[in-house]
Amino acid sequence: MKPRVFVFQPIPQIAIDTLETAADVTVYPHLDRMISMDEMIGAAQRHDYLLALHENFIPAQVLRANLDLKGVAILGAKTGMVDYDVALELKVPVVSFGREGIPGGGPNKNTADLTVALMLNLAYRVIEADRYTHAGKFKQNQTMALMGVGCAGKTVGMIGLGNMGEYMAPVFRALDMQVVYNKRSRLSPEKEQDLDVEWVAEMDDVFRQADFLVVACPLTPETMDMIGARQFALMKPTAFFINTARGRIVVEADLIAALEQGQIAGAGIETFASEPPEQWEVTVPEALRRMENVILTPHNGGATWQTRGYMLNTLAQGIVALINGERPQTLMNLEVFGGETLYPELYGRGPAVPVAEGGPAIYVY
């Protein structure tokens, strides 16, 4: 009998085809809801390998549900998607995706492009105009009804400027926008000149200057809840706030208050405070959902067919390698194959970030 692989949600067919060269594959079929904890435990009991995407944190009770579990594959760059210490204890290999050679620039490029799309939608009120026209309101006064602020001459303030930000900045400049930034470590003068961006030493001044404030920094213990009421009070009432980084960098209640009180003009939000592993089911606050000046996307910025297909296919190749008794190139816990305790730069632990009360320590990815 072939080994059995359980996939926690529908994935591109290219990865299924790879898995089926060596295993019987079961895919959780629902797109309208996440798999429940009970369903995860049941799947672990009946299968030899598990393949999980970003939303599916694999806790200790799932790993312990099958003491003969042969391996876990996770679509994350760090070990924060699985109870890593329990996986080590049980000697369950944990495999990540291949980060080299991702076509089209990969998740960072895709998320950068989405950030630009959110900014353009806010600047030109595209979604509002779409709703307006769908409602049959194509009248002589539509120009005044849907006047946008545009991009030319505006200032983009970036909090963080790493791999993702380096994709964004040239696009902002091509739109005739000024780009100012603050981050933990300033870029080199050569890099600043190459990107044509301006360093601002005090983060507060980025909030004050920005017409579009873009959050592009990682979630760490230092950045968790870093942006709240005080920062929103610094922003212009005409400014827009965009977060395509991590939801928990922002105090969500303070963002809602700033929008309700007119402290800022609108927002584009890709990530939310409730996302796993903070809690099992993601909840988008009703207050944000009812605001017409807020654009919401379900944390799918990196999810193009090209990128996601490639990444999941490398996960599938990792499982096939385990089935064949080989050590996958993207193995995270090398110890289970007799290697040294090692967290390679691309496949290691990030800093620990606390989760909901009573939960385990989670390592960001």
Image: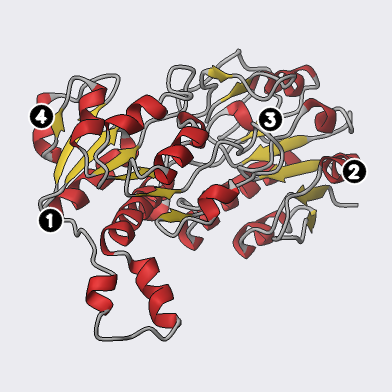
Mark on residue 42? Answer: 2
Residue picked out by circle 4 = 190
Q: Residues within 10 Å of mark 1 (few under 14, many from 20)?
A: few
Residue at the image position 63 percent from the left and 64 percent from the top: 13
Q: Position of residue 36 (x, y in %)?
A: 81, 45
Q: Amino acid at mark 3?
A: Val
* Mark toward the start of the polypeptide (2 vs 4): 2
* Mark toward the start of the polypeptide (2 vs 3): 2
SS type, badge 3: loop
Residue 41 visible, this orientation: yes
Taking depth in this image into account, of 264 and 227 the one nearest to the observer is 264
Q: Residues within 10 Å of mark 3 (few under 14, many from 20)?
A: many
Residue at the image position 17 percent from the left and 25 percent from the top: 200
Query: Where, by quadrant of the figure, is residue 108 drawn?
Result: top left
Residue at the image position 75 percent from the left and 19 percent from the top: 358
How many marks on residues?
4
